[in-house]
Image: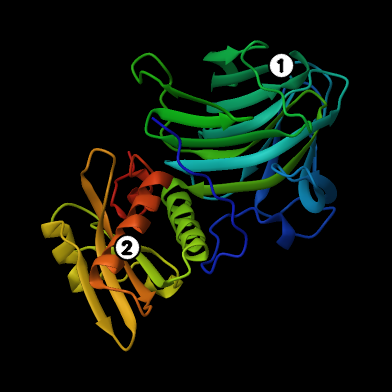
Amino acid sequence: MRSLLWILFIGLMQADANPLLLEQLPEGKLPANLKVIKVGPGALGKVRVTTENVPHPTTGVTEKQRILEITGGGAAADHYTLVLLDQPAYSSLSIATRFRIVDGEGVRAAGVIFRMQPNQKDYYLLAVKPETKEAFWTVFQDGLPVKGFKYDEDQFISPKDGWQSIKLQAEENTSRWTLNHRRDFITYNPETTPDYRRGMVGFWVRSDSRVQFAAPVIRTLKEERQYQLVALLKQIARENNRVLSLKLSARPAAQKPPVVIASLEPKDIGQPAHEVVTKVLETEENFHGQKDGISTVTVPVKDRNNNIIGAARMRLSSRVASTQRKDLAYGNNIAKQILAAAPEGDLFDAGREKKSP
């Protein structure tokens, strides 16, 4: 399955659900919502928020950012420092961060952990060992690695700036990630692999590695998809200068009335969709209206298999040469832009009801 469009857009009009907004935390201290544990010989690792020059992932231009610095407490190969987000367990989740390993005398490796169980010994790990150009997806049980896979030097993509980039999503028994622009996934068999469906998330550092984590983002998968949808709408509005307002609506479940799942106006999200949206979802037809020089267009949004997954409703500034046909063509082009960003339609899961296992 193709990965979704990842849009990092600072300054969204809605509140960010990410619990690790480092720019809002004081320097030099362990954030209050994190806790540190150690495994193996050695002392408890050290964690602090500090400021570092971090290169932009696209332009390479450095800028000062708050980062989370973790230093392991022992050089032994079986010493691990785990920094956990101390809040309710995540089931379907999204984790993203960039990190670099600054130094260390022992095994230099780091990554992210997810779905850690209450015993703090059972969890999943996605980690990188840059010096040997290796990456690992590993299952830990009773504190020991029991299953997983790795890709090594001929498959590993090394970042030119030294900052490893991880974007991971976990849903049910599938984990998908992008590691330094390489996309991978694993769907494990719950009958043969320890099956953790929810748990704590955090960061993992091996031996005495000193690791700097930049721009960490932790959200539920629903929050991440909604974040992406809103960012996508803002991008579309910037690139299509006729757009005055734009909303996406979908049914939270079969036969249920549609609701707004993304909008340029955050107050709209979660509200019942306009009655015209219901007609569009039922008939798959386009609707058009015009009043006071403003055109209102509502069009279906379909996935690449031509299945209707939602509706886009927008207000457009009118032009002298504008006609109903041209307005509808404009609206359908915007629907195509949405589809291009999320060809599988997964982003629309932000508005669907789903029970956690």
Of 291 and 75, the residue lying toward us? 291
Q: Name the residue tied to disc 1.
A: 133
| Residue 193 position within the rendered picture, expressed as x and y whole percent measured from the top left | 42, 17
Q: Residue at x 51, y 49 (%)?
A: 219
Q: Does the rendering let one see residue 13? A: yes
Please tell me which residue is depicted at 52% across the width and 31% down the height of the picture. Answer: 177
x and y, in percent, of residue 196 in the image? 43, 29
Residue shown at 45%/61% (left/top)? 233
Kindly state the secondary structure of the residue where label 1 is placed.
loop
- Check disc 2 and give the amino acid type: Gly
- Identify the image quadrant of the N terminus: top left
Q: Callout 2: few (<14), some (14-19), or many (20+) C-alpha neighbours within 10 Å?
A: many
Return the x and y of residue 158 as percentages of the image width and height.
Answer: 71, 23
Q: Nearer the viewer, mark 1 or mark 2?
A: 2
Dividing the picture into quadrants, the one containing residue 149 is: top right
Mark number displayed over residue 273? none
Q: Is residue 309 left or right of residue 229?
A: left
Quadrant in which residue 12 is drawn: bottom right
User: Disc 2 designates what residue?
Assistant: 331
Which residue does the image show at 83% across and 24% down from the upper left? 74
Q: Is residue 320 left or right of residue 186?
A: left
Q: Is residue 326 above or below residue 53?
A: below
